[in-house]
């Protein structure tokens, strides 16, 4: 019996992949931690294996009999009290998972990275699969951890592990229960917590498209290659994203733009309050502002041409996301 293992299956992207695999009739095993929130996998016919990617021995057990691996587990946080945990999970955790995969003789692995691991083209062009990360000077803990995780993954490919890397854009849609920073952006806009905007921008992608992109990468992706997963035409400036969320959610859109230097000062102030007083996640951090300010515009044509990833336009993505949060009582 062929077993497909999905790490991070209780999370936003992982759960969506599991549902696609079950529809295809695959036998799916998932890793869960003791305290995992299982809402996203309730009612799914899967084999649960208690394991943590930081625990190598538990990953060896989870990998027994596995032929295909989707390594999705990772930490997606832009504010933490201990940023070292990002590299412990995203980098060292990846090494644990892929070491176990090599030992188990897994036939093919899809490793989930992020467009956060891409650099920005100096000439202002689109960042494609070959654009090297060049943003260390901005001190972006999450972005650095994803880039270094990707480097670790490719090291295993060089050692003989059949592996494909996928880089989703900013994912939005149904099932973002925590929510992730992308879902929090939508919720904060709906709740009026973002009274202004700054000069930044990002590519947005639908969760269903990303999940299908993973499955297609397993089926069609060339070993040793990477694919940026997103929708051509879904890049938007912060002003336009917030206006679209407001329009769909029928709330007031922020009218005032502020210089990025002021946005950074504001973010630093509220982050300091979070760090030392409230211990609750702030609306934005300086890293958020710096990351969005580079306006990394990504080329998704390779995944469209070679994998056939679906293309859901931005407005539809926002409509689905707002409807989900309203239905679930988040707003």
Image (cartoon, grey):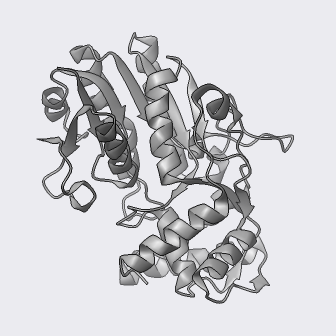
Q: Is residue 106 left or right of residue 1?
A: right
Q: In the rendered view, tell whether residue 103 sits above or below residue 281.
A: above
Residue 190, given in percent of the width and then of the height, sits at 55, 82
Examine the rendered structure and indicate whether residue 331 appears above or below residue 18. below
Q: Residue at x 43, y 33 (%)?
A: 215
Residue 306 seen anywhere in this rendered image of the structure: yes
Q: Nearer the viewer, residue 237 or 257?
A: 237
- The residue drawn where x is 36% and y is 59% is 82
- In the displayed orientation, state which residue is furthest to the right: 123
Q: What quarter of the picture does the C terminus occupy?
A: bottom left
- Horizontal and vertical percent for residue 71? 35, 35
Which of the 4 image quadrants contains residue 195? bottom right
- Taking depth in this image into account, of 130 and 37 the one nearest to the observer is 37
Q: Position of residue 117 (x, y in %)?
A: 57, 41
Q: Residue at x 43, y 54 (%)?
A: 76
Estimate the x, y position of residue 65 in percent, counting from the top left. 16, 20
* Left or right placement of residue 199 versus residue 176 in this view: right
Question: What number of labels is visible?
Answer: 0
Query: Is 311 in front, or is 8?
Result: 311
Dividing the picture into quarters, in which one does residue 306 lie? top right
Rendered view: 224 above or below 202: above
Please state if 228 lies on the left or on the right of 2 as rendered: right
Assign the N terminus to one quadrant of the image. Answer: top left
Q: Nearer the viewer, residue 216 or 67?
A: 216
Tell me, yes or no, if residue 283 can be seen here: no
Question: Taking 151 as reference, is 33 above or below it?
Answer: below
Image point 50% across, 68% down: which residue?
A: 321
């Amino acid at each position: 019996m062929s077993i497909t293992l999905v790490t991070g299956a209780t999370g936003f992207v992982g759960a969506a992949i599991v549902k696609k695999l079950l529809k295809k009739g695959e036998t799916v095993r998932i890793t869960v931690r003791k305290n995992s929130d299982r809402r996203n996998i309730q009612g799914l016919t899967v084999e649960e294996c208690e394991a943590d990617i930081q625990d190598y021995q538990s990953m060896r057990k989870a990998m027994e009999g596995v032929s295909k691996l989707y390594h999705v587990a990772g930490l997606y946080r832009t504010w933490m009290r201990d940023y070292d945990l990002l590299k412990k999970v995203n980098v060292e955790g990846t090494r644990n998972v892929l070491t176990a995969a090599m030992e188990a003789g897994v036939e093919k692995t899809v490793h989930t990275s992020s467009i956060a691991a891409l650099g920005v083209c100096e000439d202002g062009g689109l960042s494609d699969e070959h654009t090297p990360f060049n943003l260390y000077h901005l001190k972006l803990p999450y972005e650095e951890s994803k880039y270094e995780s990707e480097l670790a993954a490719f090291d295993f490919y060089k050692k003989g592990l059949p592996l494909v890397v996928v880089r989703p854009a900013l994912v939005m849609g149904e099932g973002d229960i925590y929510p992730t920073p992308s879902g929090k952006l939508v919720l904060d806009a709906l709740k009026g917590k973002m009274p202004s905007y700054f000069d930044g921008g990002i590519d947005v992608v639908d969760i269903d498209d990303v999940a299908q992109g993973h499955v297609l990468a397993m089926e069609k992706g060339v070993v040793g290659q990477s694919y940026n997963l997103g929708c051509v035409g879904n890049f938007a400036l912060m002003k336009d994203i917030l206006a679209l969320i407001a329009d769909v959610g029928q709330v007031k859109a922020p009218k005032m733009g502020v210089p990025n230097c002021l946005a950074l000062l504001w973010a630093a102030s509220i982050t300091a309050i979070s760090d030392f007083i409230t211990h609750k996640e702030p609306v934005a951090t300086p890293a958020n502002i710096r990351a969005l300010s580079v306006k990394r515009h990504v080329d998704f044509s390779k995944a469209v041409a070679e994998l056939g990833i679906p293309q859901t336009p931005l407005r539809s993505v926002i409509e689905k996301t707002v409807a989900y949060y309203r239905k679930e009582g988040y707003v």
